[in-house]
Amino acid sequence: MNGTTASSTQLLRRINSDALLRFALQEQVFTAGEAMAMTGLTRATVLGVCDGLVDAGWLEEADDSQAAGRSLKVGRPARRYQLREAAGVVVGLDAGETHFTTIVADLRGRELGTRRQSIDSHALGRAGRAACARELIRLTLHDVGRALDDVLLTVVGVPAPIDAHGMSPEGGEFWHLMNSAFDSHLHGTVIIENDANLAAVAERAHNPSANLATLLTGERFGAGLIVDGRLLRGPRGGAGEMRFLDTLSDSKFVPDEGGWDGFGALARKWARSRIHSYNGKTILRRIPEGEITAEDVFQAAREGDPFAEDIIARLGARLARIAVVLSSLLDIERVVIAGGISRAIEPVLEHARTVLPTDSGLPLPELVASTFGAEAVVKGAIESALTRIKLEPSAFLPKGALAPDIRTTGTNPSSC
């Protein structure tokens, strides 16, 4: 057999293995006949590939039909296979500025365990953030009886622009701190992604949409943009960075308008800076000026406080302008507010809907709140990890495989 024929045979075997593994990742238990119907492979090929995947540690033979509660037919029962639970897990990590949240999930996406930890990124530095992430993941794995070498893939979301290679642009000190070389400290294959992009991935999986803007907002502001079914990134990862907000106001830029601060930061800053000059009554005066939080503002607005309601109206007008810009430029159909503040954002959405222009001639984008709360990023990280494994499962080596461990850390599973 010449080299070309051997290479072609190896490629075909890999293609068939990937097709059958993708089928196994979405099925509980299956027979060769069921795999044939889904993949289009012959019986001999399916049985051969299944045997190879059992040897490789991906699959295992299931109990016989009678033990599984199925009726036995005359003759030898069909061999039945299932994904090997011990093959490995995926990890999602939301590596924010003030909090880390991690989820460990099995290869079908079932969440096994989660942890959240407050951090001080500026005190920790890059090395400290990476070490903290590794320890938090280790503890979460320990909670569910798994170890670091069970991890096939970790997806990390950071509040910074991220290009296709997991890198952030030069010159951004904050971005450099947030993108803390996690791929050099975490086990297995590691993918770094922008946090708003991952929130958009979570939203699209939950409510499929070909044209979606997910606004991740709290202290900071970023957008994950999906247009014509594809996530927009840009050559430097800058798609969705909301720098245009520096000039987006009713007329020209007004410093108090807040630049590209998130809605949580704006609610707090506007309340603190204006409460001393406000002539009316407000329950927020019960709180020391320097201790007013965004949560205080939203709660006061729910209680009918006019000062807080004015802040909510300003946020709503701001959101409406952002929605118009996104809709005009990218024909966005749905704008989702994500992040911890999404649980309280409905009053802002209600006001924004009332001030959206109706004379543009184009359909207005739908304005909704995410149902994921503070977990939008980490949920998207898990979804992204599962999608990557399904795309090219043979790029990963399952736990307990007979072959030597050839995994390397990096931002691209194809490098494994």
Image: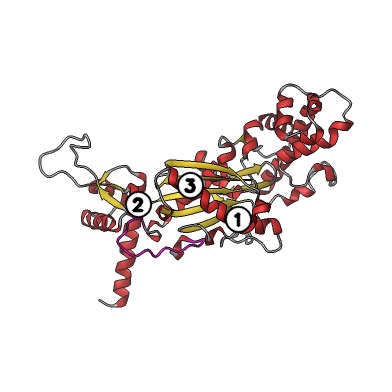
Residue at mark 3 to residue at mark 2: CA–CA distance: 20 Å
Residue under the point 59% across and 39% down:
374
> Is 12 on the left-hand or right-hand side of 275?
left
Residue 412: x %, y % from top left: 49, 61
Residue 36: in sight, yes or no? Answer: no
In the rendered structure, which amino acid carries the disc numbered 3?
Leu
Q: Mark 3 points at which residue?
A: 139
Residue at mark 2 to residue at mark 1: CA–CA distance: 30 Å
In the rendered structure, which amino acid carries the disc numbered 1?
Gly
**What segment carries the magenta color?**
398-412
Image quadrant of residue 235? bottom right
Q: Mark 1 points at which residue?
A: 128
Residue under the point 32% across and 53% down:
58
Check the image and report above or below for 5 versus 150: below
**Which is more foreground, mark 2 or mark 1?**
1
Q: Mark 2 points at which residue?
A: 87
